[in-house]
Amino acid sequence: MTETATWIAVDWGTSNLRAWVFGAGDALITQLGSDQGMGSLAPDQFEPALLDLIAPYLGDAPTPVICCGMVGARQGWQEAAYVSVPAVPPSVTNATKVPAKDPRLVPVILPGMMQANPADVMRGEETQIAGFLSQRPDFDGVLCLPGTHTKWVRISAGEVVSFSTYMSGEMFALLSEQSVLRHSAQSDGWDNDSFLNALDDTLSRPQNLASRLFGLRAETLLNDMSSTIAKSRLSGFLIGLELAGAKPYWLGQEIALIGDPKLAQLYKTALDQQGAPSEIHTGDDMTLLGLKAAYASWKDS
């Protein structure tokens, strides 16, 4: 027989839906996933998509379903308002309750965070930050959350004080897949020396980035530069530009990286090169810890 859930944690992004099902004593029963991300669903399709995944674990009693991520975007299941910084990462006290047709579901969506000036928003990362702070409540420093839109977040006294977003990941994808560099930078390989040299170049001379980018194509044509080197240099140029812009965040600070371990290691290598040590925490682990912290506040409310 399938064990019945006491509560369910959900991370619902643009492309994917993930759920962790918990039973008696908060023991993890199973982890589930599907490709029914926010980007492919109309508002009235979210509840059926969720039920397709978790229905076997629902009993007769109403089950709390705590959601984070793009499910709370304007185009999602229901928009969850942002919490303005400075503030502690939001919990269920700030969450948006979603009316469900199925009486077995009690879904809530955790809000994102916003910054008025300079304008910035996050949705999903705040749950990872909450997860990190649940383990490191006294942390005073900077969190970097590498990804498509990398976040640099200043933390003090348990609050998100300010943050800044860099589109380096999206720029890398666009340039390597849709620009003229798609003929040069498609590779599964990696050259760390090329990455670090490009990183230093852009940190020192960020104004030359546009020229350096086309130089990747020119060197491919004229000097037969390998796609592995081109890809590594492209990444170095873009992360170098990001580190130049984010320097007020990371210089002289305690730094923790939260994200995919492979990408986080790339940022760690870049920061190490600048004499800025950092520690890595897996993004999935921090997301789940954040959702658990939200459920704990649910039980205490």
Image: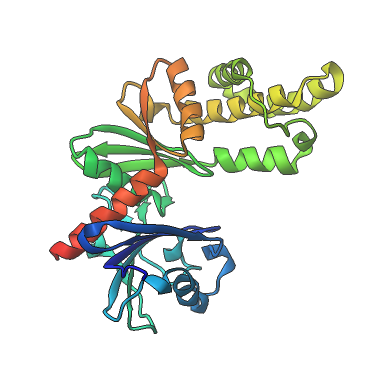
Residue found at the very far right of the displayed protein: 222
Residue 165 lies, in percent from the top left, at 46, 42
Quarter of the image that includes the N terminus = bottom left
Q: Is residue 283 left or right of residue 300?
A: right
Do we see residue 251 in this rendering?
yes
Residue at (52, 58) in percent of width and height: 16
Tell me the colour scheme of the image.
Answer: rainbow
Do we see residue 84 in this rendering?
no
Quarter holding residue 93: bottom left
Quarter holding residue 182: top right
Residue at (20, 58) in percent of width and height: 296
> 55 and 127: which one is in front?
55
Residue 22 lies, in percent from the top left, at 30, 61
The relative height of residue 295 versus residue 280 in the rendered view (above or below) is: below
Residue at (46, 32) in percent of width and height: 264
Residue found at the very far front of the displayed protein: 1
Q: Is residue 54 left or right of residue 205?
A: left
Residue 169 lies, in percent from the top left, at 57, 40
Residue 9 lies, in percent from the top left, at 34, 60
Count the labels in the image: 0
Quarter of the image that includes the C terminus = bottom left
The relative height of residue 10 versus residue 264 in the rendered view (above or below) is: below
